[in-house]
Image (cartoon, rainbow, N blue to C red):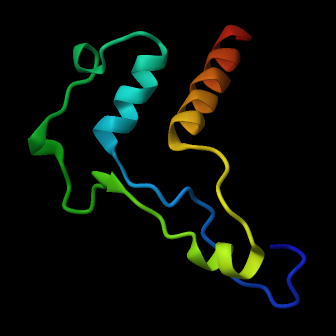
Amino acid sequence: MLQQEQPDDFVIATGKTISLSDFIAEAFGILELNWQEHVISEQSLYRPTDITISHANPSKANQKLGCYATTSVQQIVQIMVESMQRKLSSQ
């Protein structure tokens, strides 16, 4: 991106769709926990703009940069959980 002649905006993403509940389940699963025993979801607190499903389109980065995701959503969640565990254990 930084080596392009003209500045531009790019979306760097896997291009895979995942629901928020699946993302949360993946994170808690890594910790061998059932997310539904630890997360309270209150419908009355939902806002019209809250994201329930995330999907990003990386096609521009694919085409212009030749950049393709090599890390799955599940691997990304694993990396995030492990990073937070390291941070918490060093406090």
Residue at 90 percent across and 77 percent down: it is 3
Vertical comparison of 49 with 10: above or below: above
**Picture quarter with the C terminus:** top right
Residue at 19 percent across and 61 percent down: it is 48
Q: Nearer the viewer, residue 80 or 91?
A: 80
Name the quadrant containing residue 14: bottom right
Q: Is residue 85 left or right of residue 51?
A: right
Q: Can residue 76 be spotted in the picture?
A: yes
Residue at 42 percent across and 9 percent down: it is 32
Q: Nearer the viewer, residue 15 or 49?
A: 15
Vertical comparison of 69 with 4: above or below: above
Q: Can residue 9 be spotted in the picture?
A: no
Vertical comparison of 83 with 37: above or below: below
Residue at 18 percent across and 48 percent down: it is 46
Q: Is residue 22 left or right of residue 88?
A: left
Which percent across, then down, holds residue 47?
20, 55
Which percent across, then down, holds residue 22?
33, 36
**Picture quarter with the N terminus:** bottom right
Q: Is residue 24 left or right of residue 86?
A: left
Vertical comparison of 46 with 85: above or below: below
